[in-house]
Amino acid sequence: MIGEKSEQTNIFQMVTMEDLVPENYFYRKVNRVIDFSFIRELVKDKYCADNGRPSAAPETIMRIMLIGYFENFSELRLWNELQMHAGYRWFCKLEFNDLVPDRSTWIKTRQRWGMEVFDLIFRRIVEQCIQSGLVKGNLVAIDGTQVEANAAVTSLEAITPVVSIDEYLNRLQMEPTKATDDKSEKPARSSGDPDFRGEKFSNQTHRSTTDPDARLYRKNSAHEAKLSYLVHDALDVRSGVILDTEATLAHGRAERETAIEFLERLGRNVFALMDKNYRAGEFLHKLRHQGIHPLVSMDSLDFEVVPVWKRRTFKLDCYRRRHNLFNEIKARNYARRLNRKRVFSKTYKLRIKIEHKFAEAKECHGLDRARGYGLENMKIQARLTATVQNIKRLVRHLTRSKPNKATGVQTTAVRFKEGFSVFKVLPFFSFSVSNFGLDLV
């Protein structure tokens, strides 16, 4: 006998959120591993303590943002999914009868918190990764990736210099008068006009009206220049944890400048895996001065000859040029010396892991394109993307393996420039200069 389903619906549904969410659900694992209660303490100075309408719970807003980055949802799709997805509502501590905070609330909250709060949240997750024993040692990989801005090339418009009223009136008087019906000259292209044939663009002469912080950039000559930003990561190679991240304007020196900031926070005696874009002599000299060992692939392993000048100079600028040239050659030769060591041949192939991290961020978490406008929003996006990647690694580490109870681990406090302290793991068996026979003198 064929059964038949009644069309009559029940007014009340006797079900709980806990019954609908399985035990092996990913967000249930995240909820067990990460305690988000610290967010309220971080943002309490952003709100008035005794006046105004109560806001949405900061922890709930943060959980909503993380789901958007975990699932690579747009804000519109995320809002629609939260209306009907029981698992997402359970993770955000929302009951079936609770209203989902409006999308405008998410935007205003993100603007109210600012980049500093998201940076502290990112570093708190990094601290938890280190304390759990996930971070292995002092072998890091540093690289940057191009992120397409949320603006089209057709939005570029010539930069109009700002002049005073008197200067503008004087310029009008000096210009010859033209007939109003003179159509010999083509008017300048305005923003949004798709016809830009024959027009040359550069960062010095043009700006995007949609996103003024975006810059024309291309990684190499095989690709076209696009309005972009650069996102940089410092990755712990052994564990896959992103130790530091930053977003900058797109220009040629950005990767090296950001790498120096990363390594200053990481401390001395760190082996840094980097590609050929980081082999500039001035950059290598700064790393050597900081006590960093750069593992950079050099074009030639032949040592450069240090120049010897026959005459002594008394000109300050000439002396500085000689001194800088001497330091750069010495730094490049040190990098070549590392290229010949066993540490280079064994570890440089691990640099590909940071490329895998960038691929994961772009394919799974939406880092292929900026979600908002401006450098500030790009910085927030970079930190939230790195945060969800680290949470995935931490959840996998704590749910698949037992906590490390080895006694041969020494922890020392490290303080970031922002004043947020973490712990740097220094195992007794970690990389050391003596292990690889390196001469730093």
Image: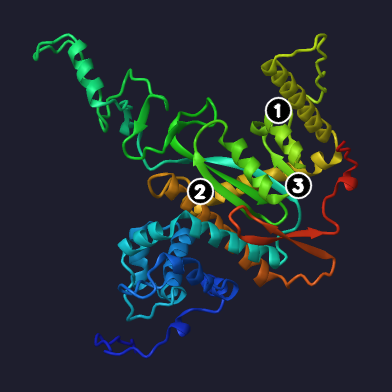
**Quick check: 410 left or right of 280?**
right
Q: Which residue type does callout 3 highlight?
A: Val
Question: Which residue lies at the image location 25% right of the left edge and 85% below the top edge?
Answer: 7
Q: Reading the chain from its start, which is encountered first: label 3 or label 2?
A: 3
Mark-to-mark CA distance, 3 and 2:
28 Å
Secondary structure of the residue carrying tag 2 is: helix
**Quick check: 311 left or right of 274?**
right
Q: Which residue is mark 3?
A: 270
Return the residue nearer the eye: 5 or 191. Answer: 191
Q: Which residue is mark 2?
A: 362
- Is there a contact, CB below 8 Å, between mark 3 and mark 2? no
**Mark 1 surroundings within 10 Å by alpha-carbon count, few (fewer than 14), some (14 through 19), many (20 or more):** many
Q: Which residue type does callout 1 highlight?
A: Gly
Q: Say above or below: 360 vs 193.
A: below
Q: Reading the chain from its start, which is encountered first: label 2 or label 1?
A: 1
Quarter of the C terminus within the rendering: top right
Return the residue nearer the eye: 263 or 317. Answer: 317
Q: Which residue type does callout 2 highlight?
A: Lys
Q: Which residue is mark 1?
A: 281
